[in-house]
Image (cartoon, rainbow, N blue to C red):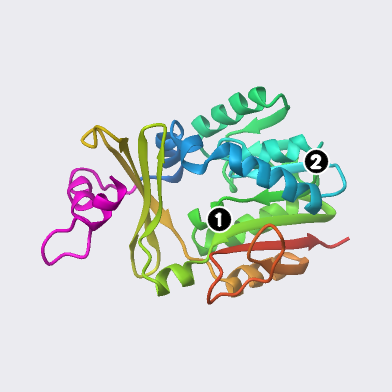
Amino acid sequence: MAVIFVKQREKNSSEPFVIKKMKQQFSKIISVNNFYDEVSDIYEQMIDFKKNLILREDAYKKMFTAKGKAADIGSGIGLDSIALALNGHRVTAFDISPKMIAETKKNAIKYKVYIETYAYSYETIPKKFNNKFNSVISIGNTIAHVNSKQLNTAIKKMYGLLKPGGKIFLHILNYRLIRNENKRINNIANREGKIIIRFYDFRKNNLDFNILSFPQNSPKEFKLVTTKHYPHTKNKIGAYLKAAGFTKIKFTKNFAGENFNAGNSKDMFVEAEKKL
């Protein structure tokens, strides 16, 4: 099914025919909170929650050896929050989508951990949380949802949330590689009888990020939602971190801490510390 979907094209068009027809019916760009409200019911299937939880739990055990208070910004359905909580951290999860926060609560109960949850964006996290956390993470390409000005503000906000000596851990896809390869299809998943396709439309200064989902046996019953991604670079992120006051800035390509290469690394992870 997926192979037929990708290869079927309109004459004289570089866009898959099925995607083109679906986008003609619904291609409106929506806000980030509405976008994730819309996909909250399929998100666990889309990211293969159980497999990635094992990866995260092991990675955070090595990365955050001292138990403490951790903030997860853009928590989604709670994958990273639960991984941290299973490692003994006291976790506070923030997400702009109320429905994602509801899913985090359900998953916390399922995995028998306690997670404090709030429906806040980077900008709206109250000052009462400042200087409260030993670590702040924002994984799953969360920072791609904010523009350059908002990213600068978000990094300053995360600096304020940390205690002196606290660590920040961020993740974003390597959009330089995605653009160079002209790689529009991000991922195709077929889980529990549902096809979930993540793909891009390339714009001059940003990308439209789309999630298309439909039952395998009934593609006409599809849902297509679209929001914006901003392709932040290593240099930009590094400059904002330094300006905020972060030190020991390190860019890696995976949870194992291998060096990031802009020319071939799929992902970019960023570690940094707040001054003591």
Task: Give the Cα distance between marks 2 and 1.
Answer: 21 Å
| Nearer to the camera, 64 or 51 | 51
What's drawn in magenta, residue-wise? 1-29
| Secondary structure of residue under mark 1 | helix
Residue 233 at x, y = what percent? 55, 70
Answer left or right for 94 relative to 86: left
Residue 3 screen position, x and y as percent: 29, 52
Q: Residues within 10 Å of mark 1 (few under 14, many from 20)?
A: many
Name the one closer to the observer, 203 or 120.
203
State the residue position of label 2.
69
Q: Would you place residue 88 above or below residue 189 in this image?
A: above
Q: Which mark is first along the chain, 1 or 2?
A: 2
Asked if residue 179 lies in the magenta stretch, the reply is no
Query: Any mark on residue 113, and which?
Result: none
Identify which residue is drawn at 59% across, 48% down.
Answer: 123
Type of amino acid at the residue the image marks with label 2: Lys
Residue 119 against residue 203 in the figure, above or below: above
Residue drawn at (64%, 40%), measured in percent from left and top? 53
Q: At 49% across and 53% down in the image, what residue appears?
A: 145
